Amino acid sequence: MASPALLLLLLFVAVPFLAAIGFSLYNVRLGDPRAPTFMGFTQYARILTDPDISRQFLQALLHNLVFAAVVVPVQTALALSLALLVKKTIPGVGIFRSLFFLPVVFPIALVAIIWRLILARGDDGLLNSALGFFSGGAFASQDWLGSELTALASVIVLSIWQGCGFQMVILLAALQQVPAELYEAAELDRASAWQRFIHVTVPGIQTTLVFVALYTMILSLRVFDQIYVLAKSGGGLNEGATRTVMYEAVTAAFDENNIGRASAISVVFFVIVVILSIIQRRATREKES
């Protein structure tokens, strides 16, 4: 029964990862007629010790960690709030569920175009125009995507907007599985709405909450497409303030034609993500027990 899933994992996860480990040990370049030369762990040493390469890698890793530290709690809390909102049986609630989930199915190119219009510099940007209108012209226009202070924050807001609907659907399914008798018993005990949420809702969906937080963290750590599309589509994104580890790997592979370094970056980042996932899972497991 498990063989189809195991076969897919083997073909599309295990084999590519083992190939990446193999490439990281060689000096591999696309289109180079010369045979790859064995370098051992030189690529890993350069990533961690070479001042030029390690500085970029550590800066990209810091961007990943900041991104995940903000996105995971904010997106999870917002998704839970939306799930509680659309769980109510009111007329037209299905429309709101569809609207909240709609950004999830948008292609990233369309998302980039929408947010380029919202965050455009000068008075042409929708956000600048709105802030200037409501402040009576007192708010000066900002370059949201180009500024070092707001570039990463802009990408964070974009990512939360696009991904929140998916977590909302998962949490909504979990909320619908909590027995109604528990809420009735809590009401008979004169529990307030906040007490029902803390002592009935949260324990009832705790396993799902842990899964959503873990899944969101993994997605946040491997963020790439939002930054790449905004940077390469003329959106004026400050690449230096938003470069992530996956962005560094893709740049090394296709801009610098260094497949060995890109593979080494991917392997190192995979190990970091696994360690962080284990730490988070242990912490949440202890909290559950």
Image (cartoon, rainbow, N blue to C red):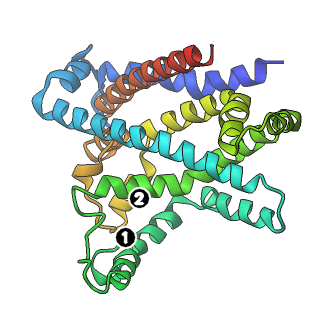
Q: Amino acid at mark 2?
A: Val
Residue 191's quadrant in the figure? top right
- Which label is found at residue 119? 1
SS of the residue at dot 1? Answer: loop
Q: Position of residue 85 (x, y in %)?
A: 70, 55
Residue located farthest toward the right when viewing the structure as drawn: 181
Q: 164 above or below 3?
A: below
Q: Residue at the location (56% across, 18% down)?
A: 287
Residue 30 makes an appearance in the image: no
Q: Amino acid at mark 1?
A: Leu
Q: Residue at the location (34% across, 54% down)?
A: 153
Q: Residue at the location (71% across, 47% down)?
A: 169
How many numbered circles does the render carry? Answer: 2
Q: Position of residue 152 (x, y in %)?
A: 32, 52
Residue 38's quadrant in the figure? top left
Q: Position of residue 221 (x, y in %)?
A: 43, 36
- Which label is found at residue 229? 2
